[in-house]
Image (tube, grey):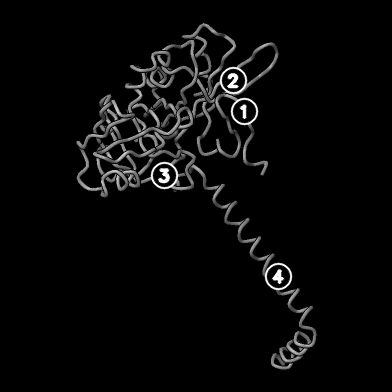
Amino acid sequence: MFQNTFKIAWRNLVKDLQFTLLNVLGLAAGLACFLLIYLWVHQQLGMDHFGGKGSQIYQVLEQRNSAGRIAISDESPGPLSETLAKERPEIKYAAAVAPPDWFQKFTLSVGDKDLKAAGQYAGKDYFQIFPFKLLAGNKSQVLADKNDIVISDQLAKRLFNTTQNLIGKPILLQHHEVFVVSGVFQHPSDQSSQQFDFVLSFEYLKDIMGWVTSWNNTGPHHFLLLKKGTHIRAFNQEIASVVAKYSGDTTRTAFAIPFAKNSLENTFVHGARTGGDWKM
């Protein structure tokens, strides 16, 4: 029965090759589009989940009320995360970050090599919060010193042709400042919105950009690793007034959201809300 059905179908297909070819191409194009859309959606839904390890990572945002208008910003005063860590027992780790898009690519030099790379400044607990794999170095110590630099495995290969035995190696930044390699991390995957080639200490940034230490300036991003069992609504009620308390600006309210939701539900560029990828 099946053989007869197959023969009849085959004869009909061969009988009108143009019609057959058109349908086969249409089916192939449809399947290809479906697979591409599925892969893209799967990649987006997994963004910043870090293989299930990112459930306790939160980003602190601000709601600002001005002249009857409400705006949401991912930029806050530099001391915010450090202050929250001291005041709130629910916080396991906290770190301020000056992200790569603040800067043009930096020049890193080793010997006669000059390379351009994307870098950011981060608080000492950054690698305690984000589960980026360290190939060398201790995540609790890699940003302990102002002149530490933590580089990706890809950058290590470009600068040193290896990822081995690099702790303590000097790297010249912008042709004038020497930093010492304190760790090597596996470059973030495409499912991380945090994309960078190296990390410098936020403490060093305080020395060269003193304004980040003021409560009356904004700019840095702030990330928290909350202890398991933390009730986020209650936590947000506790931190709501912290910016107003130290800056004197009562129009600003702080709150935390799961970092894994940020790329899909809330996208911010230099303090301006641009919408999330749920639209797409």
Quadrant housing residue 177: top left
Nearer-N-terminus badge (3/1): 3
Spatial CA span between label 1 and label 2: 11 Å
The quarter of the picture where the C terminus appears is: top right
> Which residue bears the numbered disc 3?
188
> Which residue bears the numbered disc 4?
27
Mark nearest the camera among 4 and 2 is 4
Indicate the position of residue 32 as horizontal and vertical percent values: 64, 64
- Which amino acid lies under the numbered mark 1 shown in the image of this protein? Arg
- Which amino acid lies under the numbered mark 2 shown in the image of this protein? Gln
Badge 4 element: helix
Spatial CA span between label 4 and label 3: 36 Å
Indicate the position of residue 229 as horizontal and vertical percent values: 44, 33
- Label 1 CA crowd tier, 10 Å (few <14, some 14–19, many 20+): some
- Label 3 CA crowd tier, 10 Å (few <14, some 14–19, many 20+): some
Q: 109 or 228: nearer the eye?
A: 109
- Label 4 CA crowd tier, 10 Å (few <14, some 14–19, many 20+): few
Q: Is residue 118 left or right of residue 73?
A: left
Q: Is residue 274 left or right of residue 200?
A: right
Badge 1 element: strand
